[in-house]
Image (cartoon, rainbow, N blue to C red):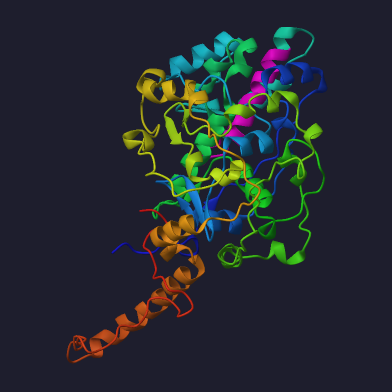
């Protein structure tokens, strides 16, 4: 039997969310050309650990979805485009990884004319402080210095917001080769790579032995606040990208600051039928003129059921399981895509590989994403069908009341020391329960399903 392990019992460490690095207005034109202008406007999103904890508990690594009372949902390419303002179509973010110091130094010399010293990098990670120092040294009087400035700014965005690691002070240099040709930077699908990193972070955090969580947590929090307004603060304005609406927000209610994981967990358990906003970006919720043209330009591919790629990370975009988020009727989905060994690869230790070759099959699927978009007639009613709910409750219903499962685990932990203390005083082993005795129910009588040993994933 798999042992329950909730966030309260393992103290998952959540990385502090950094302020987005500021930039000089003289490089605004180059920043827009690179595709990172909108995400640079976000500012600072205040982290809220109880919300992250409660969401991680409901994440299912095999499906890449959250399980809520009335169905599955997830963060999609559409959410990334609207929340962060990143391009979600285009070339996959992939290439080679080189663990050698010489490779790192040569790449920096080629692009910046200077290489980080031994104290400015560790392994394959270059310290963000080195990029910030180089950024400040640019005089911004010509195109070359402006491009170097923007490249340093982008690498800082990678290390703090989009592809952050658990250290929070460095960024892997594998992204630098994709910045060599400044005119080509905007052609990569940085949004899908960010989403792949988000999925990978959630999958790791849902493991019982994980103690830290990295990744684009601002994306996770703002997604939850947009889709489930009852578990988050109200936005402070109506700007774009949508994450900017929570820039340095002040909780609209005092008790929000004091919420615990149990409070958020209970609110998700009691989420009403209309508590999840399926049409979060419809014209009646987000004014069409607010969304820039270049973000809307890739809207046709947002619902594609395809792999998400970011170098060694390959994750699955399960839009066939969350069709209601795109305005379609949801039937019981087919079995979740199995990624095999590609789902467990990490860059620990020397890994000198060309991921464009290693992941050729997945890359081919991504490049043909236009063949995998959802198609159907849009519906006005987002309520789940009886057929879907029968399938959903029958398959996953025994772990949807997370609060009760957590309470049972806490009660078991409190009883265990007492039982261990009393055990030496027992002269005879306890009598085996006879067949005429009725077993105690595993959950309260108000719910017909028993605990399911699936939280978090082991």
The chief SS type of the magenta part is helix
Residue 44 position in % (x across, y down): 72, 42
Q: Which residues are magenta?
A: 146-168
Is residue 161 highlighted in magenta? yes
Residue 435 position in % (x across, y down): 20, 86
Residue drawn at 51 percent across, 39 percent down:
319
Relative horizontal placement of residue 190, taking residue 60 as reference (left or right):
right
Residue drawn at 67 percent across, 26 percent down:
132
Residue 433 position in % (x across, y down): 21, 86
Would residue 12 be seen by someone viewing this image from the given angle? no
Quadrant where the N terminus sits is: bottom left
Residue drawn at 51 percent across, 69 percent down:
403
Viewer-proximal residue among 213 and 168: 213
Relative horizontal placement of residue 346, taking residue 254 as reference (left or right):
left
Viewer-proximal residue among 198 and 449: 449
The answer to whether residue 209 is above or below residue 169 is below
Would residue 374 be seen by someone viewing this image from the given angle? yes
The answer to whether residue 290 is above or below residue 246 is above
């Amino acid at each position: 039997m798999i042992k329950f392990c909730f966030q309260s019992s393992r103290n998952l460490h959540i990385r502090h969310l950094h302020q987005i690095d500021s930039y000089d207005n003289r490089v605004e034109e180059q920043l827009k050309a690179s595709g990172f202008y909108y995400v640079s406007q976000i500012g600072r999103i205040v982290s809220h650990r109880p919300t992250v904890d409660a969401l991680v508990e409901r994440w299912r690594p095999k499906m890449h979805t959250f399980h809520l009372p009335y169905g599955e949902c997830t963060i999609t390419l559409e959410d990334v485009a609207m929340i962060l303002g990143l391009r979600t179509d285009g070339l996959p973010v992939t290439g080679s990884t080189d663990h050698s110091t010489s490779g790192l130094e040569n790449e920096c010399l080629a692009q910046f004319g200077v290489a980080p010293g031994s104290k400015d990098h560790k392994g394959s990670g270059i310290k963000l402080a080195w990029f910030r120092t180089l950024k400040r040294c640019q005089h911004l009087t010509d195109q070359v210095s402006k491009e170097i400035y923007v490249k340093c700014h982008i690498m800082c965005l990678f290390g703090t917001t989009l592809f952050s690691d658990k250290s929070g002070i460095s960024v892997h240099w594998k992204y630098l080769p994709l910045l060599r040709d400044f005119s080509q930077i905007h052609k990569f699908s940085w949004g899908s790579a960010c989403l792949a990193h988000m999925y990978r972070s959630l999958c790791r955090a849902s493991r019982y032995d994980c103690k830290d969580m990295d990744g684009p947590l601002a994306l996770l929090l703002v997604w939850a606040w947009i889709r489930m307004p009852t578990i988050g603060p109200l936005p402070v304005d109506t700007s774009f990208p949508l994450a900017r609406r929570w820039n340095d927000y002040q909780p609209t209610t005092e008790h929000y600051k004091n919420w615990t994981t149990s409070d958020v967990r209970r609110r998700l358990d009691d989420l009403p039928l209309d508590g999840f906003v399926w049409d979060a970006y419809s014209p009646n919720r987000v004014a069409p003129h607010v969304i820039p043209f270049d973000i809307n330009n890739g809207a046709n591919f947002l619902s594609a059921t395809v792999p998400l790629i970011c170098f060694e990370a390959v994750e699955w975009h399960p839009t066939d399981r969350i069709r209601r988020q795109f305005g379609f009727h949801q039937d019981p989905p087919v079995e979740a895509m199995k990624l095999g060994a590609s789902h467990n690869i990490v860059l620990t230790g020397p890994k000198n590989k060309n991921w464009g070759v290693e992941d050729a099959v997945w890359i081919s699927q991504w490049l043909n994403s236009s063949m995998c978009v959802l198609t159907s007639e849009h519906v006005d009613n987002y309520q789940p069908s009886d057929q879907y709910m029968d399938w959903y409750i029958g398959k996953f219903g025994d772990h949807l009341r997370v609060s009760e499962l957590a309470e049972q685990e806490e009660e078991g932990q409190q009883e265990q020391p007492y039982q261990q203390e009393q055990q030496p005083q027992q002269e005879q082993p306890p009598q085996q329960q006879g067949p005429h005795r009725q077993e105690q129910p595993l959950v309260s009588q108000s719910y017909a399903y028993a605990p399911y040993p699936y939280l978090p994933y082991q």
